[in-house]
Amino acid sequence: MFIGQGRRTMPEQSGKVQTVLGLIEPGQLGRTMTHEHLTMTFECSHVPPAPGDEGLAAAPIEMKHLHWLQQNPYSHSENLLLNQEIEAVKEELLCYRKAGGGSIVENTTTGITRNLPVLRKLAKETGVHIIAGAGYYVDVTHSDETRKMTVEKLTDIIVSEVLHGADGTDIRCGVIGEIGTSWPITESEKKVLRATAHAQTQLGCPVIIHPGRNKAAPGEAIRILQEAGGNISKTVMSHLDRTLFDQQELLEFAKMGSYLEYDLFGTEMLNYPFNLDVDMPSDSQRVQALAFLIREGYEDRILIAHDIHTKHRLTKYGGHGFSHILKNIVPKMLSRGHRSHQIQSISSPDGGSAPRDDLYSPEF
Ligand SMILES: CC(=O)NCCS(=O)(=O)O
């Protein structure tokens, strides 16, 4: 989350974390969820309900429908409008603070209704440090104007979102991403990836990538960034828990040097509707995947989060909320033999200089 010493960073930004309320010291971050959404829309990923489920898909969100929603989250149009839940999210953030949370990286980029004034308000009212994301989501959300832009123009926009503010506001982003890619990666997405690498070179800040829903997608996105001069050691590959399952393939990818993010904690669904070949893991299997990566020496490259992006995952609707990792997953990791120093070293995307003890403190 740190702004590095890029060619275009202002001196006061170097080595600092840029939140929606301004710069903070890395030591102020506290425990940090590196991939969340506090307000966004996800209509771009709507999945038509199965025949016979149309009634459920149109029904109000109620406890009696929760299991159906957990299995079919993208088939309920209203469930995709997290931007309607600002008050509920505020309550969640207050609970997150009580549970020991300090910061959240808000990954909503152009295309899924980023709302920086709301993020600033939430940060002010809850005391949680919020770091906003610059750049663009997946191709289906690119406007005609975005598609026509050159890599240079896209680079200038991303740089400006970090240096000066985004969406016509003076609120500055502190990371680039999540940058959306599909599978196969489209031409417009390749331009955005190259622009991302160029902007990162100028700014020195972290990059977060949303890979396409195919096991080849993470590696291909990293190759494009690498060829464009991106700093892979300051790049986070998101959603590995629905993308890479084979241990050897995971290790091959890990060798490329990015952060390895398991960010769908709390998601327990049988079928992954965007790729029916995928067996979605449970939280226990996610914890096992982390244990495998730690055994293989990657403990300082792992990040974890919930990636809340639909209503039903909020506690208001019976979901797990933003404190699930702190309250349930960290104790589970300890009960499965993870040492507290290993959990502490599951770090933020800072190039290794974060005060890791602040992220997962020894009381766990
Ligand atoms: C907001 C977002 O992109 N979340 C990831 C959903 S996915 O199904 O894992 O692609």
Image (cartoon, rainbow, N blue to C red):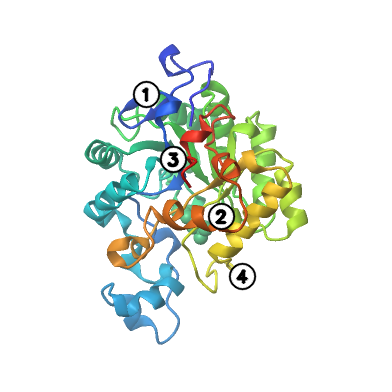
| Left or right, 81 with reference to 222 | left
| Left or right, 116 with reference to 216 | left
Q: Which residue is mark 3?
A: 31
Camera-nearest label, 1 or 2: 2
**Residue located at (68% from left, 57% from top):** 215
Picture disc at residue 23: 1
Marks 3/2 in contact by CB < 8 Å: the verdict is no
The type of residue carrying mark 1 is Leu
**Residue located at (36% from left, 48% from top):** 99
First in residue order: circle 3 vs circle 4: 3
Q: Is residue 213 visible?
A: no
Marks 1/4 in contact by CB < 8 Å: the verdict is no
The answer to which of 275 and 318 lies nearer the viewer is: 318
The type of residue carrying mark 3 is Arg
First in residue order: circle 3 vs circle 1: 1
Marks 3/4 in contact by CB < 8 Å: the verdict is no
Picture disc at residue 146: none
Q: Which residue is mark 2?
A: 333
Callout 3: few (<14), some (14-19), or many (20+) C-alpha neighbours within 10 Å?
Answer: many
**Residue located at (28% from left, 52% from top):** 89
Question: Count the marks: how many?
Answer: 4
| Left or right, 358 with reference to 171 | right
